[in-house]
Image (cartoon, rainbow, N blue to C red):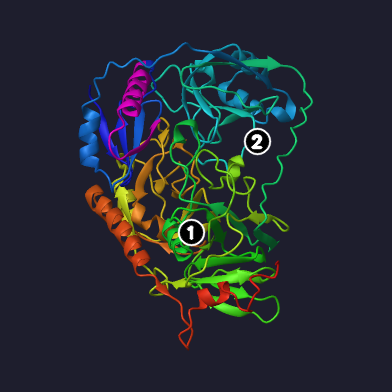
Amino acid sequence: MKVRFLSAGDRALVVEFGDHIDRTLSDDVLRLDSSLRSSRPGGVVETVPTFRSLMVHYDPVVTTRADLERAIASQLDSTRAWRTAATLWRVPVCYDGEFAPDLVEVARLTGIAPSEVAALHSATHYHVYMLGFLPGFPYMGDLPAPLALPRRADPRVRVPAGSISIATTDRDNADPPLRLRTHTAGAFRTRRHRLVRTDRRNGFRVDQKEGRERQLPSGGRADRWMTAAGLRVLAPGLHTTVQDLGRPGYQAIGVPPSGALDGFSLRLANALVRNALGAPALEILLSGPTLEVAADTVRVALVGTDASLAIGAETARILAAGQSVTLSRGEVFETIVGYGSACCYLAAEGGIAVPLVLGSASTYVRAAIGGFEGRALRHGDFVPLAVARASAGAELRLPSSMTATGDQPIRVVLGPQQECFTAAALAALLGGEFRISPSADRMGMRLDGPLLRHRGGWDIVSDAIATGAIQVPGSGQAILLLADHQTTGGYPKIATVVSADLPVVGRCRPGDTLRFTAVTVEAAEELCRDAEREVAALVARLEPVVDREGFDLGSLYAGNLISGVVSGLE
């Protein structure tokens, strides 16, 4: 079987079976996916099947692209059966008025009357080829040819929940896909925003219904997750969320990995309070929260370039980031984000005690899952802590303070679709400067700078996306995708930031300038291993904090300061 192996950075390998949408190609993709899920080659983290390719995410500390490619090649001719009986799902849809904001435009583009568009659209059975983009989005095929529309030149920023969109990315295919996603030309609103269980074995039918239907009342809100110990939010900051090292394993159903934008700093913050390095902590973006201790004592540590803690409500003492401190019940402290970084991390001993969702505490705000009620913190929230009292022992600090990364170029691996771009576009990517626009969040950053022109069309058959991908829509404006990125997309990716430099990108603010330089996959994998060794070395070199007289401050604050009295609660 003939395939192409394409690198998407140093943590993902794309196995491409073709360049169009075809049931035979889809079967080949799903067969390999089934085989890899069963055999579990060493270092494979997860697989993401798409219309015509399979993205294999891997850990370069455990394996390499070269070894993984050989392991995959040995399974390409697998005859493993993966099919099960298909299910037909019927989805009620409203094509009236505000529920079909693009219907008139679709009719104009296709030359078909709006009523005929609705009739044609709802009379077809659709085949589900893949899931992706965002949680629960099925990509479907077998759209009637008269409704085939090109993808939008530039993606929408938002689209209403329940929208059904149509487009074709396969100019040579008579059966273009219908998509439930935002980067498309037409959208019809479903009558109910309800979860539909589906997968790549299933069919889909859209039923036309007239008029509107009253929204069903939502279920009762889940009780707030609380423990006896916590941090009370007096001011939330701009965007403060619970994050850990992410949620791998679910991109095949549209759930992004999420996790810390700067995993390097998150791990150091956890190390300073003696947590597991991936324990849940607070990620603080641009401006920090003010918190009140609602526990006997709590040990916290802040890590971030130029960041600091202001402890005390009136006459605050300033504690630079990079060391732990033990605080007592009622103490108020503010996290101050320095200008050297867009983010910093506040870890508490024992971790933030929120429930795991799909194996992770990370907050994914767009789907309202994970973290604290699936959202950023608000005034009055009570952030639960896993332990009610700090342990005895020395406070710890980093051997040296974190410094701004300066003007270092961001290293990238070209591809996986660099052949879609002109030589001038590749030269502009690697020779130009790009400024991070105000349109930046945890999903991605739009970059102002040289326009990157495509060699031919900019509309490709959707495939999987790796964290750090630089995708370029028809406008030519590059978009650098981050932790909450869509899992699949149909714009070409010119390059992918190496995993060792993702923390550097995560610290960048709107207005900061980025430059890029290309490295090989082998070099990028070694950079990843170097970064892991650097974290381990820094953790091994953590040192106790002592005052000028040599007292161990951690033991002093946690100890029995008045004979016979252990805490104010006794």
In x, y percent, where is residue 499?
Answer: 35, 52
Mark 1: give few (<14), some (14-19) or many (20+) Cα within 10 Å. Answer: many
Q: Specify the label residue 267 is tagged with.
A: none
Is 175 situated above or below 518? above
**What's the residue type where badge 1 is placed?**
Ile
Say what secondary structure mark 1 lies in.
strand
Q: Please, which residue is most extreme toward the bottom here?
A: 549
Viewer can see residue 518: no
Q: Quadrant of residue 544?
A: bottom left
Viewer can see residue 405: yes
Which of 491/5 is in front? 5
Q: Please, which residue is most extreme toward the front here?
A: 564
Read off the residue under disc 1. Answer: 436
Name which residue lies at 55% across and 40% down: 357
Say what secondary structure mark 2 lies in.
loop
User: Which residues are the magenta region?
Assistant: 24-48
**What's the residue type where badge 2 is placed?**
Pro
Quote the CA–CA distance across marks 2 and 1: 27 Å
Which of 270/138 is in front? 270
Read off the residue under disc 2. Answer: 160
Main SS of residues in magenta: helix
In x, y percent, where is residue 196?
Answer: 60, 23
Name which residue lies at 72% across and 58% down: 379
Reply yes or no: does residue 552 show up in magenta: no
Is 27 situated above or below 532? above
- N-term mark: 2 or 1: 2
Which of 353/376 is in front? 353
Q: Is residue 163 left or right of residue 470?
A: right
Q: Is residue 515 left or right of residue 507?
A: left
- Which quarter of the rendered picture does the C terminus lie within? bottom right
In x, y percent, where is residue 508?
Answer: 47, 62
